[in-house]
Image (cartoon, rainbow, N blue to C red):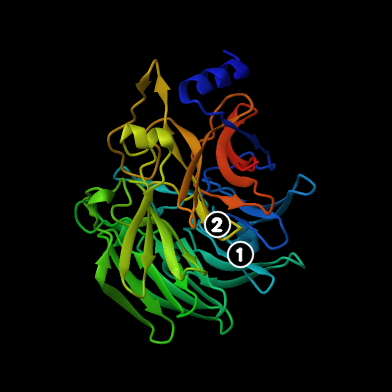
Amino acid sequence: MNSTDYFIAFESLTDQKPLIATHYFSGFERAHDTYNALSAASDGKIYYVLSSDNYEIGGQMYVYDPQTDAIRFLGDLTEICGETHLKAIPQGKSHVRFYERNGKLYFSTHVGYYQLIDGMDRLPEQAPEGYALYPGGHFLSYDLQTGAFEDLALVPNGEGMVSMTMDRERGHLYGITWPSGNFIHYDVDQNILKNLGPISHRGEAGTPGDDFRSLCRSLFVDAQNADVYFSVAEGDIFTYNPDTQILRLLENVDLRLDYFGKYDPTRPGSMSYNWRKIFWHPGEQVAYGVHGNSGYLFRFDPRAEQIELVERITSGPSKRSGMFDQFSYGYLGFQLGPDQETIYYLTGGPVYENGKRVKGEDQIAKGAAKGLENLHLVTYHLPTQTYIDHGAIFYQDGKRPTYVNSIAVGVNGDVYTLARFEHEGNTIQDLVKIPNPFK
């Protein structure tokens, strides 16, 4: 079946025209799966990091210009951190979005090369021959005008940064380290880094069934009060204020909701009761988040300590099937659009063969796809409470984008992500552009 026949067959099954995406090759033949590290900046360009899971080379940073349809290489993360001479396990990825403040993009780095220990991907305890162990992640900035990088601070204890957010007004970076789950506060203007210690037992360095806990991948800041918030695997929500420098449990609200499902927080393979992705809505003065496995959009008012479920924003086919989607952690491609009214969400949808839903594995011990799925673009317009599944997304040749966990929305409404595709006989992950769904 050629691609045209495929799309016709798809439409006949779904009564919906697929979105046709364009994939790009940035020049990095080893590009591996990237999480979060993609953002649109005020200059209208799209900045992103392509990850490496190899100990010989680090992650690579690029910029895409929609006006010229051109990609430019910006730097190797290990070189940017000044660690090439160390011959250590490199800065393999960035696991966070870019946050813009005063003409600079702020982000952090993470390890990309793991060691398989007891069936799980772990921070290496033994480096490859001739190499040193991972030195730890870095907080970095990139100047949009000059193109200069600045190495701001080193993450302690040789750990990477698995999540990060920024208080842009006050210049504070907050994040959680991997694998132990230490809460980090870095003051950009004062150049002071504080390690507040572990937030959730031993995090993902723990033993399954005992002190293992999946770590929160998304934090947000109440811009008015300067409070930062994150969740833990048991569903509790914590807050931190830079003035008091105290981590505090919210007593009157949690994420242990029946609609999210039932989880054993000591077991790997899901994000448990953690929210998957969350952002602060400056107009409404509340946060909107999505729970990964169930796909429920919720509204969180941290000042009132209240959570309200809004809508299940999984794809239409997923809603009809009643089943969780195939990616075991849920999806990170979730953000507020440029209009400050529309949420954009890249999520999964079941694949059907001969009229039957293709099932994946029942359980896996890490964040990965349990089986094949379609990629769908869903939008939710907050003022009118309008949910739209814009359809499944395919490349021009009829193949599916997979392992999608990032999103950026351009000024003209085009949607960008990082996804897998075949390039010269190899599977890589690189930039993908999805046309404005409202055109």
Say whether residue 211 is left or right of residue 223.
left
As helix, strand or loop, the secondary structure at mark 1 comes to: loop
Say whether residue 205 is left or right of residue 26.
left
Q: Which residue is mark 2?
A: 91
Count of numbered tags: 2
Q: Earlier in the sequence, mark 2 or mark 1?
A: 1
Residue placed most toward the observer, 197 or 289: 289
User: Mark 2 and 1 residues: CB-CB less than 8 Å, in contact?
Assistant: yes
Q: Which residue is mark 1?
A: 81
Disc 2 and disc 1: Cα gap in Å?
8 Å
**What residue do we see at 65% from left, 60% from top?**
79
| Picture coordinates of residue 119, whole percent (x, y) | 31, 42
Residue placed most toward the observer, 310 or 153: 310
Residues packed near mark 2 inside 10 Å, few (<14), some (14 to 19) or many (20 plus): many
* Residue 107: numbered disc: none
Say whether residue 312 is left or right of residue 141.
left
